[in-house]
């Protein structure tokens, strides 16, 4: 009702105010007829209006307050409904959180103190107590503890969420989720079901595999071995840092751009081997950084492609090659020893033996190549009758083979059944094997026996020598002398007894000779020079006798003086010396004449040959048949004469000691071929066959190629001169230890033995059976050039049996200033 009254009053007020305004407009303030038929004065109307205004305002305020209170009451009812709903949701959430399949840890960012809500089944191995639960290391596996703590740290410090799977010490999988909300860090532990457990295990294994792959790739990046992996299509999907360095690129770019380390052929070979056998393992070469490198490559097929690894073995290959060369040199060195050497490994198998070992025991090469057992070798020596029978063979053999278990060398003396005496030394090796050294003492023992016999007869021998001998000790006293010494110096026997000082001998002898010689004898015997030298010469006595003396130092500071009566021989020597000087002057004149004539002949010969060739050309005009024949004869004779002149010049150069060899590698096959070509026309003219036999592995040697070809050409030309029509000349070549041997054999008439002594002399050809008589220089040149290389020449021939000339060259030529006489 109040509300309606207020509303009515409020509606009448405008009408009242409009009436007052109209009255004032009509005139002075007077009576006004108010609504509802009420007549009032103006003042009362004003008061009444003010009252009504105040009353209206109050009513309006009361109405607004009533409306606000009703709205607040309605909002309160709505909020109480929401609070009730929130309480229900909170109770439901708390019930859900307290289920036994999850457990939650909440960290408040301000305090850092964790709160724990929920439970997990005891069968999983998760403790219920707060302190035990937070001690992860007590109920989780080690790798799970590391993963969980690292993930929680990243969540709290960097707000990094995570979803991981861990494993308790009982083997139960647990899923763990980490999230942040506002200032809270929340970690939830959940017990997955069987399907989720399998998923969690797979997730754990996947993480472990990812970690293992990461560790493996980190390791491969750290090693200096190129490695790679390929997908099913054969494309590179990963390479390590070493691979990237090898192809000059970044690891990611090298894989994405497909930069290959090996060439196309090598990759095809790897693919074929991998497809056939599932694996490739072999050595391949490629260029890395501009250098050729050798790698041991292993590439295997995988379920999703393939993976490979390459190990740089370039240095190892160099070391291996050096080891092979060292072992070869070692074997070559041992093969040169006279002592027999055999090496056995820890399994008592023969690993190496030199030629002296095989020769000592008469063993065949195939048998030695089979690496026989040491015990079987001893049994064979016994069965062959080389080793003498022992009272207890088994015990004796065990004693000998005990060296395999010894650290000290053992030494034996074996007396073989054929009379040989061996000194046997067995040296244990560091790796368990032994080395046997057999030294043949037979000759040594024989020499010792002979030496002892020689010592016994020495006195008798010295007493009967015509040469005077006196041995002085370091104190200058006689140790030994023979009667010839006293007789040559006209001394009595009591004057040369043992213990007589050389000064006393000097006083007795220098009166018969010059004092300077005996002064030298005394100085040589009693001097303290560090370098003791031998002195020799002649001394002439006052009686006209001439003695040849020699002062030779002996061990232990002793000195031997020898004197020989050479009166007659000196006189003969003087005569021969004078004759020899005359012969040497004659020989020099001959050499000078030969050189001069040879050089003087060379120029006109060259002119003759040149004009002959010029006349044979069409530009000089036509020639008849006889003229052409004459020119051919002139050219042939000039070539022969020029060859003789050149041979003479070569021999003169050798005799003068100024011949120089141009040493280089000589390929045997090339030298033989070129020498054969030089005589091919001559052989064809007389239907002579050339049989060339070059032994396998001959290769090359160090010599002067030009001189070697000249030697072979001279030998073939000489053989072609004596070989019958339709016969065969054999040219053979082979290696003989440190020599290269060439042999030329013909089927000619041969030479008698008395001719062989002069066959190498110059200008002495042997015309028997030859087609034409030469200058007699071919074999002389052969001998001179071969000896200039440091080799030798042999000739074997007999009347009616052909001739064989054999040249022995050293594999490494040594230059001699004088090679021929």
Image (spheres, grey):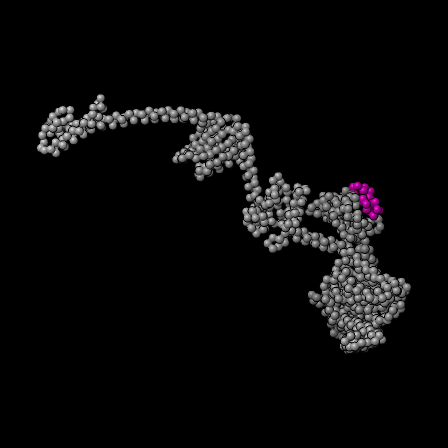
Specify whether residue 271 is painted magenta.
no
Quadrant that contains the N terminus: top left
Choose top left, top right, bottom left or bottom right for residue 610: bottom right
Say which quarter of the image contains residue 462. bottom right
Q: Is residue 445 above or below residue 1?
A: below
Q: Does 73 appear above or below 336? A: above
Residue 800: percent from the left, percent from the top?
90, 64
**Residue 68 versus residue 210: which sits nearer the camera?**
68
Q: Where is residue 680 in the image (x, y as percent from the top left)?
A: 81, 65
* Left or right, residue 690 beside residue 224: right
Furthest-right residue in view?
800
Left or right: where does residue 14 sit relative to residue 525? left
Q: In which quarter of the image is the C terminus?
A: bottom right
- Residue 375 x/y as whole percent: 78, 43
Q: Which residue is drawn at 70% across and 54% down?
A: 325
Taking the image as shown, residue 217 lies to the left or right of residue 472, namely left
Chain part drawn in magenta: 378-396
Measured along the vertical axis of the image, is residue 91 above or below residue 416? above
């Amino acid at each position: 009702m109040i509300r309606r009254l207020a509303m009515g009053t409020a509606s009448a007020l405008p009408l009242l105010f409009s009436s007052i305004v109209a009255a004032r407009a009509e005139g002075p303030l007077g009576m006004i007829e108010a609504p509802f038929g009420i007549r009032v004065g103006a003042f009362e109307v004003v008061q009444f209006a003010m009252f009504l205004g105040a009353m209206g305002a109050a009513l309006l305020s009361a109405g607004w307050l009533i409306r606000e209170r009703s709205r607040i009451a309605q909002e309160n009812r709505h909020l109480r409904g929401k609070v009730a709903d929130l309480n229900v949701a909170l109770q439901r959430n708390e019930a859900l959180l307290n289920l036994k399949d999850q457990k939650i840890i909440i960290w408040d960012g301000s305090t850092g103190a964790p709160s724990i809500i929920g439970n997990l089944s005891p069968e999983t191995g998760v403790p219920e107590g707060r302190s035990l639960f937070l001690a992860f290391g007590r109920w989780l596996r080690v790798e799970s503890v590391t993963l969980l703590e690292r993930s929680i740290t990243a969540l709290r410090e960097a707000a990094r969420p995570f979803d991981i799977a861990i494993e308790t010490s009982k083997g139960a999988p647990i899923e763990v989720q980490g999230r942040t909300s506002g200032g809270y860090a929340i970690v939830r532990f959940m017990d997955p079901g069987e399907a989720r457990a399998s998923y969690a295990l797979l997730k754990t294994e996947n993480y472990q595999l990812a970690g293992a792959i990461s560790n493996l790739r980190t390791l491969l990046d750290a090693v200096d071995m190129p490695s790679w992996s390929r997908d099913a299509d054969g494309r590179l999907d990963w390479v390590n840092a070493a691979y990237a360095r090898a192809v000059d690129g970044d690891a990611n770019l090298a894989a994405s751009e497909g930069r290959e380390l090996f060439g196309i052929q090598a990759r095809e070979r790897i693919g074929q081997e991998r497809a056939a056998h599932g694996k490739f393992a072999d050595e391949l070469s490629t260029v890395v950084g501009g250098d050729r490198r050798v790698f041991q490559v292993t590439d295997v097929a995988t379920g999703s492609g393939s993976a490979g690894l390459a190990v740089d073995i370039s240095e190892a290959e160099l070391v291996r090659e050096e080891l092979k060369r060292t072992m070869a040199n070692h074997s070559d060195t041992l093969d040169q020893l006279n002592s027999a050497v055999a090496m056995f490994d820890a399994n008592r198998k023969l690993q190496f033996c030199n030629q002296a070992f095989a020769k000592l025991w008469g063993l065949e090469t195939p048998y030695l190549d089979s690496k026989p057992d040491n015990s079987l070798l001893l049994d064979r020596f016994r069965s062959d009758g080389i080793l003498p029978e022992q009272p207890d063979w088994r015990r004796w053999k065990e004693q000998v083979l005990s060296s395999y278990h010894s650290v000290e060398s053992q030494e034996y003396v074996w007396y073989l059944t054929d009379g040989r005496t061996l000194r046997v030394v067995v040296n244990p090796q560091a790796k368990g094997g032994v080395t046997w050294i057999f030294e043949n003492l037979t000759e040594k023992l024989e020499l010792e026996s002979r030496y002892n016999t020689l010592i016994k007869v020495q006195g008798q021998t010295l007493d009967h020598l015509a040469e005077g001998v006196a041995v002085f000790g370091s104190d200058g006293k006689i140790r030994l002398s023979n009667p010839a010494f006293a007789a040559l110096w006209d001394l009595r026997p009591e004057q040369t007894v043992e213990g007589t000082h050389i000064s006393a001998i000097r006083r007795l002898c220098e009166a018969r000779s010059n004092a300077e010689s005996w002064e030298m004898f005394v100085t040589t015997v009693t001097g303290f020079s560090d370098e003791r030298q031998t002195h020799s010469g002649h001394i002439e006595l006052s009686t006209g006798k001439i003695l040849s003396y020699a002062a030779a130092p002996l061990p232990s500071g002793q000195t031997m003086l020898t004197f020989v009566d050479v009166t007659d021989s000196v006189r003969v020597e003087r005569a021969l010396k004078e004759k020899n000087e005359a012969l040497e002057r004659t020989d020099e004149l001959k050499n000078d004449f030969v050189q001069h004539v040879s050089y003087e002949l060379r120029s006109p010969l060259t002119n003759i040959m040149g004009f002959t060739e010029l006349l044979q050309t069409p530009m000089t005009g036509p020639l008849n048949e006889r003229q052409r024949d004459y020119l051919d004869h002139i050219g042939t004779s000039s070539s022969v004469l020029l060859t003789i002149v050149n041979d003479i010049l070569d021999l003169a150069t050798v005799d003068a000691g100024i011949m120089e060899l141009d040493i280089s590698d000589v390929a045997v096959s090339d030298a033989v071929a070129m020498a054969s070509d030089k005589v091919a026309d001559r052989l064809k003219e007389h239907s002579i066959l050339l049989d060339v036999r070059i032994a396998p592995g001959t290769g090359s040697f160090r010599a002067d190629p030009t001189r070697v070809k000249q030697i072979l050409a001279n030998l073939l030309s000489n053989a072609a001169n004596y070989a019958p029509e339709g016969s065969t000349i054999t040219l053979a070549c082979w290696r003989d230890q440190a020599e290269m041997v060439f042999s030329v054999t013909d089927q000619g008439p041969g030479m008698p033995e008395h001719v062989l002594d002069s066959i190498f002399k110059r200008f002495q050809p042997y015309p028997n059976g030859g087609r034409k008589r030469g200058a007699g220089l071919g074999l002389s040149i052969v001998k001179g050039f071969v000896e200039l290389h440091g080799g030798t020449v042999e000739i074997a021939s007999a009347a009616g049996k052909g001739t064989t000339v054999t040249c022995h060259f050293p594999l490494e030529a040594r230059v001699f200033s004088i090679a021929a006489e």
